[in-house]
Image: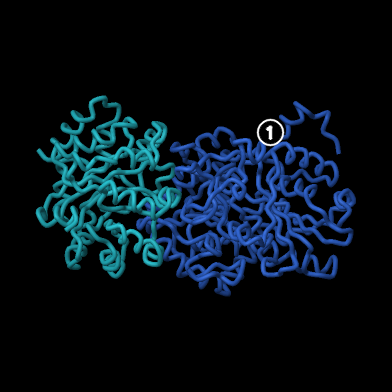
Chain colours: A cyan, B blue
């Protein structure tokens, strides 16, 4: 059983997935941030690889990525940092990045290195279903990694079912048609969430985009197995020397 | 992946050879799929074609002349024809595409138009057609470009567009494109995104190339009238993203006798670190939704290019052109800032036409090519030089006396 399967077998409600940017706020804070997330009660870590052109992300996550790139972060350095992370961190970890970075590193090498250090899955929002099915899905599977597709309120039922069929680990339900960190209201989307719940999807659903505090986490979690917090946490880390304290404060407030 | 048989036509998934496709986040899927499934059907409608052709004729001013450049021809010992896209309304070929796309947007029922712009030419061409059709227009423009291109910002505003500065990343065209795409993600139902070049996810490269293909369609019959044959020896065009080139090549791509010459901006020199010569410096990658050649670091971060010409200052290249390069169908050259500048001054005094700096790269490439006396060479004069007067004035102030015709 994979770490993601174990997590969702154990916990079907209020799973807290927290996004952090590798190499942010400092180049070497990646592991301390991940450790702090584990200690403060997160269930799953989505580790973002900083990218120059992150189309699916809003300004907060892009700015953290730009800072991380300026700090010197690269894919190769990330895998160095993650080399022994499984000695301390038992939470499932999925890497979130953009297809171009993975392509430059070498798609298969990336998957092999991710699996070797103990990463559980990948989210590549701009890897299309067509390319996944014709070429890349097989490579991802070969290395035992889960792959998580996104669905949105605009995604047709037929396509949701197909993306669910191709995903393993969980399905990422974007709460509104927006980039990350948006303030769009989630309650307008009740029909969408009801649709998702009625489809009998094979994967647990985590709801993301617009989740930022205790209230929105509770609201989003009610629509699936849990929710994903990104931009709000990145904001909480901004300018903080003590990432552990900032993380405990932030996650404490979300779960408290 | 099925390989397309034609250089001008991508596969059903939008691939030219191994380049193209639609590498987009799911949030864009519905909009892009709607375009993918409908663009050919809409463009094929008789009413669409009639309105498009009427606007090109009466509003844009087409057909644009094919002008025999006698003195330039004498200098190079061959027959050179300039395709006068500089005479289009708004001063460049860009408007061919925006006219087509505004008609497309109306047929898709869209009420709000967004666009990206670098120097402002595509922004002006978009603001123009939005005014023409009474649609809301939002143009994303890098914060740095807004400072550098004040007259075009004023034009867009006068035409009723809202210009929003892109403040992320490098604050230039690449980031303005990211912001426009994000706007589209956030406004999935009422908005159409008018991309300005043959870049972006499928079907944009093909759709824009088809709208621009009127250039080579006209060249064929104009050449027939002037020299008795539809096919030139060579077609030369500058390439940033590559929309004017795609239009100038389009009806010649599957004619093996016609040499296709693409001219990129070398900036300070291809190996200077300040260049925009994507085929020389780029590697296969993904930018703005399509797989192509991309200027990037070894870690896959997209880098900021440099060219004196804002229209060529783009770290990618349309997938059609990447395939022309990769397959060897196209001859790819590059011209430095300095050579482009000299060429603009020389051409102005030889032919009485002040070219855009972009087009001036295409003219400058003549000195890297050998043609016979009776060859027929077509150069796409993609835009006029009004917008570059600031750069030309600076050049005259510094070196005006040394510049001679």
* Residue located at (73% from left, 49% from top): B362
Q: Is residue B335 left or right of residue B166?
A: right
Question: Residue A194 falls in which quadrant of the image?
Answer: bottom left
Q: Is residue A182 left or right of residue B184?
A: left
Count neighbours of disc 1 (C-alpha within 10 A) and say few if under 14, some if 14 to 19, many if 20 or more. Answer: few
Q: Chain of mark 1?
A: B
Residue B42 in sight from this viewpoint: no
Name the quadrant containing residue A203. bottom left
* Up-down relation of residue B87 to residue B45 (above or below): above
Residue B98 picture location, percent across and down? 57, 56
Picture coordinates of residue B353, whole percent (x, y):
79, 46
Residue closest to the eye, A230 or A129: A129
Circle 1 residue: B390
Q: Is residue B126 left or right of residue A143?
A: right
Residue at horizontal 45 percent and vertical 36 percent from the top: B167
Number of numbered discs visible in the structure rendering: 1
Relative height, residue B147 to residue B221 (above, below): above
Q: Residue B99: where, in percent of width, then height?
A: 58, 59
Q: Nearer the viewer, residue B166 or A29?
A: A29
The x and y percentages for residue B48 are 56, 69
Q: Is residue B31 visible?
A: yes
Residue at the image position 58 percent from the left and 38 percent from the top? B154
Element type at mark 1: helix
Quadrant where the C terminus of chain B is found in the figure:
top right
């Amino acid at each position: 059983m994979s770490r993601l399967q174990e997590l969702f077998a154990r916990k079907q409600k209020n799973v807290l997935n927290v996004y952090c940017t590798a190499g942010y706020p400092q180049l070497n804070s990646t592991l301390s941030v991940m450790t702090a997330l584990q200690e403060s009660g997160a269930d799953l870590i989505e580790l973002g690889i900083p990218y120059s052109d992150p189309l699916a992300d809003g300004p907060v996550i892009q700015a953290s990525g730009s800072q991380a790139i300026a700090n010197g972060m690269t894919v190769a350095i990330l895998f160095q940092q993650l080399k022994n992370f499984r000695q301390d961190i038992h939470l499932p970890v999925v890497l979130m990045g953009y297809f171009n970075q993975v392509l430059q590193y070498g798609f298969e090498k990336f998957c092999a290195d991710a699996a070797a250090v103990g990463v559980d899955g990948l989210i590549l929002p701009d890897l299309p279903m067509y390319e996944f099915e014709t070429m890349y899905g097989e490579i991802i599977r070969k290395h035992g990694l889960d792959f998580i597709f996104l669905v949105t309120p605009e995604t047709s039922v037929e396509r949701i079912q197909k993306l669910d069929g191709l995903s393993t680990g969980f399905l990422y339900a974007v709460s509104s048609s927006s980039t990350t960190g948006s303030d769009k209201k989630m309650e307008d989307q009740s029909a969408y969430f009801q649709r998702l719940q009625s489809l009998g999807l094979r994967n647990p659903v985590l709801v993301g985009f617009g989740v930022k505090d205790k209230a929105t986490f509770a609201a989003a979690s009610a629509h699936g197995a849990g929710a994903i917090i990104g931009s709000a946490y990145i904001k909480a880390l901004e300018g903080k020397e003590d990432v552990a304290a900032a993380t405990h404060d932030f996650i404490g407030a979300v779960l408290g | 992946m099925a390989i397309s048989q034609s250089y001008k036509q991508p596969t059903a998934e939008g691939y030219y050879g191994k380049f193209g496709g639609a590498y987009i986040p799911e949030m864009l899927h519905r909009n892009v799929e709607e375009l993918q499934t409908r663009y050919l059907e809409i463009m094929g409608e008789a009413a669409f074609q009639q309105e498009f052709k009427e606007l090109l004729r009466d509003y844009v001013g087409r057909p644009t002349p094919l002008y025999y450049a006698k003195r330039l021809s004498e200098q190079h010992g061959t027959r050179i024809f300039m395709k006068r896209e500089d005479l289009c309304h708004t001063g460049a070929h860009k408007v061919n595409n925006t006219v087509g796309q505004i008609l497309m947007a109306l047929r898709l029922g869209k009420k709000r138009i967004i666009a990206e712009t670098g120097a402002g030419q595509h922004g002006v061409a978009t603001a123009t057609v939005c005014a023409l059709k009474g649609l809301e227009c939002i143009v994303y423009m890098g914060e740095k470009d807004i400072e550098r291109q004040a007259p075009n910002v004023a034009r867009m505003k006068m035409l009723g567009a809202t210009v929003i500065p892109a403040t992320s990343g490098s604050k230039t065209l690449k980031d303005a494109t990211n912001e426009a795409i994000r706007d589209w993600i956030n406004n999935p139902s009422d908005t159409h995104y008018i991309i300005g070049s043959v870049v972006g996810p499928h079907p944009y490269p093909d759709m824009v190339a088809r709208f621009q293909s009127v250039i080579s369609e006209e060249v064929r019959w104009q050449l027939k009238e002037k020299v008795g044959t539809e096919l030139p020896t060579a077609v030369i065009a500058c390439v940033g993203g590559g929309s004017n080139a795609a239009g100038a090549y389009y009806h010649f791509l599957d004619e093996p006798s016609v040499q296709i010459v693409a001219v990129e901006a070398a900036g300070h020199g291809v190996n200077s670190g300040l260049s925009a010569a994507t085929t020389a410096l780029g590697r296969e990658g993904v930018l703005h939704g399509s797989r192509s050649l991309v200027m990037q670091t070894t870690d896959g971060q997209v880098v900021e290019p440099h060219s004196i010409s804002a229209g060529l200052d783009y770290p990618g290249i349309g997938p059609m052109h990447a395939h022309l390069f990769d397959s060897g169908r196209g001859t790819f050259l590059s011209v430095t800032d300095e050579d482009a500048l000299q060429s603009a001054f020389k051409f102005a005094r030889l032919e009485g036409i002040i070219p855009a700096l972009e087009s001036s790269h295409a003219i400058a490439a003549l000195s890297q090519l050998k043609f016979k006396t009776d060859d027929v060479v077509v150069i796409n004069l993609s835009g006029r030089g009004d917008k570059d007067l600031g750069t030309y004035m600076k050049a005259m102030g510094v070196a005006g006396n040394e510049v001679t015709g």
